[in-house]
Amino acid sequence: MFFDYADSGAWTEGTYKANEADFAAIKLRQRVLVDMTNRSLQSTMIGETVSMPVALAPTGLTGMQHADGEILAAQAAEAFGVPFTLSTMSICSIEDVAAHTTKPFWFQLYVMKDRTFVASLISRAKAAGCSALVLTLDLQILGQRHKDIRNGLSAPPKFTPKHVWQVATRPFWAWEMTQTKRHSFGNIVGHAKGVGDLSSLSSWTAEQFDPRLSWSDVAWIKEQWGGKLILKGIMDPEDARRAADTGADAIIVSNHGGRQLDGAPSSISVLPEIVQAVGDSIEVHLDGGIRSGQDVMKALCLGAKGTYIGRPFLYGLGAYGKRGVTMALDIIRKELDITMALCGKRDIREAGPDLLHHRLPVVEAEPARPSQ
């Protein structure tokens, strides 16, 4: 059930699949006889130096893919020199991650009806030294995900004989889960009013996600936070312009990994028009569909200043823990480095539309005239 939670999209999964497929249609220019020495992937995201323009996206239930998953992923990201974003719906709490890392991480916020609890989350992120707040805008109503329904995913989990069998056939996962005390939503249980255990969490979350979230709330959150703010879930040029007007530091072009509005376009397909809409008024990032270093390069060429990976690092985490997250990042780094070199560049900050191959439009031949 936890693997399917990560490896699924909403409804028909059309948008989830398009997020990946639409990258394949973008072609790169191959350049030759250029100096490929002394290459650099170092860049910045919201003013922070990164070893490559890739961040770990906020993902819920990460600590159920592997015991202490958020802590391990944060440690891997820190060692690699890329940002880690902790989800509100994480298993390990803000304080857990802060206690096991040495550099600031980012915190992703969901807005609840209980504004006192929201303010508390923001204060806890401040106290933990988080260097950016990522406000998610597109999950006030939960998209329907058929795999989760079929698997009976719930909080607390309702284990059926099938689930018992699955756990029994994964002894290493089960053993590691018995060795950690972190099995709940660490940012919520024991912190939100009336939520003392998992049994009370399910009804609380169903009632608390606030469908009235508006642009005025963004202003309130910005004031409460007072630091760098990133708005996640922008898919429309009009929304992008409004986001830029809030004074936020960046927007993330994202359809929530295809897990919300099925039938929406892929993130990469709307990136160019959003970049054009906001110009230099706000930094633009991209989330959704990135599965390789080449995908990162294509997003950068289309105007993104940073990218995010969710499923790729979760697969690595589930397979090998902290080492698996490092492996996933290293795969992307190597692919990005080689792709940049073969496109004729040595510095990732020079990636732009000139590295894309633009096919000439196909001109259909006129039908032959009938003989006289």
Image: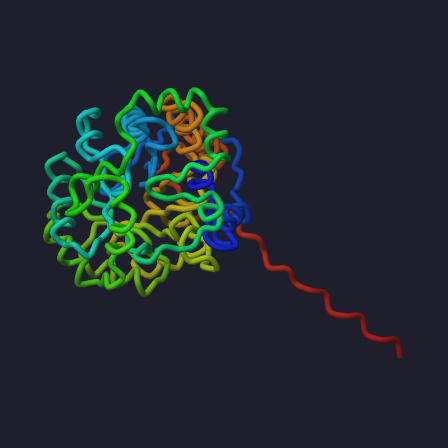
Residue 133 quadrant:
top left
- Left/right placement of residue 5 relative to residue 362 reads left
**Residue 87, above or below 72:** below
Out of 164 and 121, give the one closest to the viewer: 164
Residue 259 position within the rendered picture, expressed as x and y whole percent measured from the top left: 42, 51
Q: Residue furthest right?
A: 372
Quadrant in which the C terminus appears:
bottom right
State the residue at coordinates (39%, 40%).
158
> Is residue 47 in view from this perspective?
no
Q: Residue furthest front?
A: 161
Residue 351 quadrant:
top left
Residue 39 position within the rendered picture, expressed as x and y whole percent measured from the top left: 38, 28
Residue 226 position within the rendered picture, expressed as x and y whole percent measured from the top left: 11, 48
Quadrant in which the N terminus appears:
top left
Looking at the picture, the colour scheme in use is: rainbow
Out of 162 and 293, give the one closest to the viewer: 162
- Left/right placement of residue 166 relative to residue 183 reads right
Residue 106 position within the rendered picture, expressed as x and y whole percent measured from the top left: 23, 38
State the residue at coordinates (36%, 34%).
347
State the residue at coordinates (48%, 59%).
263
Instruction: Give the number of marks.
Output: 0
Out of 269 and 97, give the one closest to the viewer: 97
> Is residue 125 in view from this perspective?
yes
Out of 3 and 303, give the one closest to the viewer: 3
Residue 178 quadrant:
top left
State the residue at coordinates (23%, 61%).
213
